[in-house]
Image: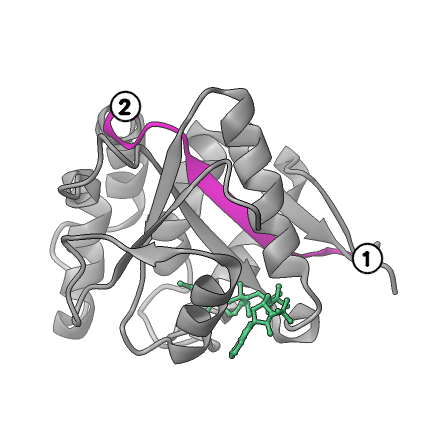
């Protein structure tokens, strides 16, 4: 099986949602954890492929899409568009009051894009999410996806990129450290924030 990286296409939508769900529990499968399997992807994948599809790249196995990197080039502008164009979509799918108290934080995240406005947002204007199904992990595809995204951001004149992650995702943290991300000043042990220049050698 040869996996190739290519730009996102609209028909990849359901595979992207599937990959997001199956890596959403600190890198592991979150199927059945929330009252709707679409809740997590509607927060962390849907807005990117809907609002900024040109910055989405997928790993195509020839049979399906099993990984992706998705991003916003300018987080401030993305937050405005998310509020205007995505919150109504999200609201049509997920009531403001979560079905389960344990998932209220996630529903809140879906309704509040301003959570993305970190202190360093102007210095590190872009941000990303990256996920690969287990069968594709550990084959340099994560590194290649980051490289692909950095190239696309450079072409758009974006100087730096950031990401937020779960402090429990030790494996992802090892990956980010290895490919050259560094901690941002407002990073905390409970909310790690990492950044990288788009011309960094990845
Ligand atoms: C995190 C993830 C994107 C990394 O992608 P990947 O394709 O598995 O990583 P790569 O094979 O490109 O690894 C790149 C480098 O990081 C290192 N690395 C990756 N995972 C590592 C780990 N768990 N521990 C130590 N080093 C690691 C690799 O050894 C490699 O180093 P090398 O090139 O010097 O040999 C992928 O594993 C994944 O999607 N995991 C599940 C979902 C997830 O956690 N997403 C991130 C949410 S914040």
| Farthest residue, direction right | 1
Decide: is 99 above or below 48. Answer: below
Q: Residue 51 at what x, y percent from top left? A: 42, 29
Q: What residue is rendered at 30% in x and 78% in y?
A: 168
* Quarter of image, res 120: top left
Q: Which residue is mark 1?
A: 63
Q: Which residue in the protein does label 2 denote?
A: 77
Q: Are marks 1 and 2 in contact (CB under 8 Å)?
A: no
Residue 30 vs 195, above or below: the answer is below
Q: Residue at x 67, y 39 (%)?
A: 11
Q: Which mark is residue 50?
A: none
Residue 70 in magenta? yes
Q: Residue at x 22, y 36 (%)?
A: 121
Using a 10 Å C-alpha cutoff, classify the residue at mark 2 as few (fewer than 14 neighbours), some (14 to 19) or many (20 or more). Answer: few
Label total for image: 2
Pinpoint residue 129: horizontal percent, then vertical percent.
43, 51
Task: Determine if residue 73 is in view.
Answer: yes
Callout 1: SS: loop
Q: Is residue 135 left or right of residue 156?
A: right
Mark 1, Cα crowd under 10 Å, few <14 / some 14-19 / many 20+, is: few
Q: Quadrant of residue 72?
A: top left
Q: Is residue 72 magenta?
A: yes
Magenta segment boundaries in residue numbering = 64-77
Colour scheme in the image? one colour
**Quadrant of picture, ligand 1:** bottom right
């Amino acid at each position: 099986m040869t996996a190739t990286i290519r730009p996102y296409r609209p028909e990849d939508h359901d595979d992207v949602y599937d990959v997001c769900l199956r890596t959403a529990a600190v890198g592991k499968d979150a199927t059945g954890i929330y009252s709707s399997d679409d809740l997590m992807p509607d927060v962390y994948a849907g807005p990117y492929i809907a609002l900024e599809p040109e910055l989405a790249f997928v790993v195509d196995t020839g049979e399906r899409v099993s990984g992706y990197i998705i991003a916003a080039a300018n987080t401030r502008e993305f937050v405005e568009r998310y509020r205007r164009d995505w919150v109504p979509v999200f609201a049509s799918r997920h009531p403001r009051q979560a079905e389960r108290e344990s998932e209220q934080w996630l529903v809140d995240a879906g309704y509040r894009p301003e959570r993305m406005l970190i202190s360093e947002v102007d210095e590190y204007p872009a941000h990303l999410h990256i996920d690969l199904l287990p069968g594709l992990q550990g084959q340099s595809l994560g590194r290649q996806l980051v490289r692909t995204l950095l190239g696309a951001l450079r072409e758009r004149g974006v100087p730096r990129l950031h990401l937020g992650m779960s402090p429990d995702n030790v494996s992802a943290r090892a990956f980010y450290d290895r490919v050259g991300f560094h901690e941002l000043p407002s990073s905390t042990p409970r909310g790690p924030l990492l950044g990288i220049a788009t011309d960094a050698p990845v």
